[in-house]
Amino acid sequence: MAQTGDDRDAKARSLDASLHEQLYYQLYSILFEDIVNGTYPVGEQIPSETELMERYSVSRATVRRSMEILVNNGLIVRRRGRGSQVVSSKPATALKSVGSCIKRTHPDRVVPVKRVVSAQIVGAEGTAARELGVEEGRELYRLERIRCSAGVPYYLETIYLTRDFAPNALDHDFSGESLRAYYANILHVRWTHARQRVSARAADARCAGLLGIAEGSAILSVDRTSFDHDDIAREYMTSLYRSDQFYLDMSLEA
């Protein structure tokens, strides 16, 4: 369900000139997230340049630069005298599914919220080192996030990037900023393919505590390694889904 204009205004986030990110990029990240999560659904117009200038206290040039990136992402089209309309909720830089996807048992009726559990530099080991093709001990950026809906946590994701690939990742707050936007517009990565494995497992004590379920509960585990146009593994991600909230949907052809 899309939010009303009043809801959006009430939740309007402010921009912070003291942050590392430029104001145009902060505004872009807000609009990007609102389009991807359905706050502004396909077919609907996003606020006008003047409305965004007033809401976020920025210049017209800042708003226009943010809009240009959204256009380049394939998310909106701009028509003179008619405003900017959402044409897709999936950025052109995102990997596309090839026949299966993880779906919510009960789709969101409110905008989901991301919460960062931890963001730190760690030494590569085990599966993360192997999937990223780096030696043990190599510095990796590790991000753990929980996604919640109406205060209920429903999946936990852990993302690994090599530090030389994402040297400034610690400067970003990915509870509000879009990770996909960071990849596309800061790291300029172009994804070409990914390898994904789906399995069932039992939640350990830490996972159970974060997801609000009993230890040993069945969870859906999705491990994905994503590659760029040079066929280099750039991201390794593990997502743990509550089995009472998600299911695997597949399409088959004869």
Image (cartoon, rainbow, N blue to C red):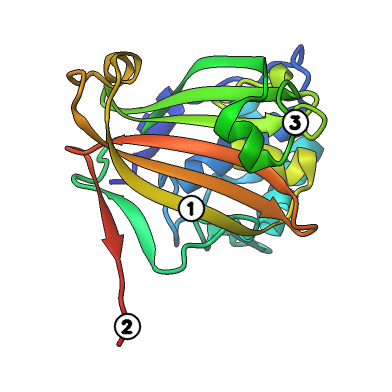
Q: Could you tell me if residue 129 is visible in this image?
A: yes
Q: Residue at x 18, y 27 (%)?
A: 217
**Looking at this view, is 222 or 46 the one in front?**
222
Q: Amino acid at mark 3?
A: Glu
Q: Which numbered disc covers residue 196? A: 1
Compared across the picture, whether 192 is left or right of 251 comes to right
Q: Residue at x 61, y 23 (%)?
A: 142
Compared across the picture, whether 227 is left or right of 164 comes to left
- Mark found first going from the N terminus, 3 or 1: 3
Q: Farthest bottom residue?
A: 254
The correct choice, above or below, for 61 with respect to 150 in the image is: below
Where residue 224 appears, as percent x and y from the top left, is: 52, 46
C-alpha gap between disc 1 and disc 2: 20 Å
When asked about the image quadrant of residue 71, the answer is bottom right
Q: Amino acid at mark 1?
A: Gln
Q: Residue at x 74, y 35 (%)?
A: 134
Give the class, few, some or many, for how many residues have Cα within 10 Å of label 3's Cα (few <14, many ≥20). Answer: some
C-alpha gap between disc 3 and disc 2: 41 Å
Where residue 169 appears, as percent x and y from the top left, is: 72, 24
Q: Amino acid at mark 2?
A: Glu
When asked about the image quadrant of residue 171, the answer is top right
- Mark found first going from the N terminus, 1 or 2: 1
Q: Residue at x 30, y 65 (%)?
A: 250
Disc 3 to disc 1: CB gap under 8 Å: no
Q: How many marks?
A: 3
**Label 3: element kind:** loop
Q: Which numbered disc covers residue 253? A: 2
**Looking at this view, is 41 or 73 the one in front?**
73
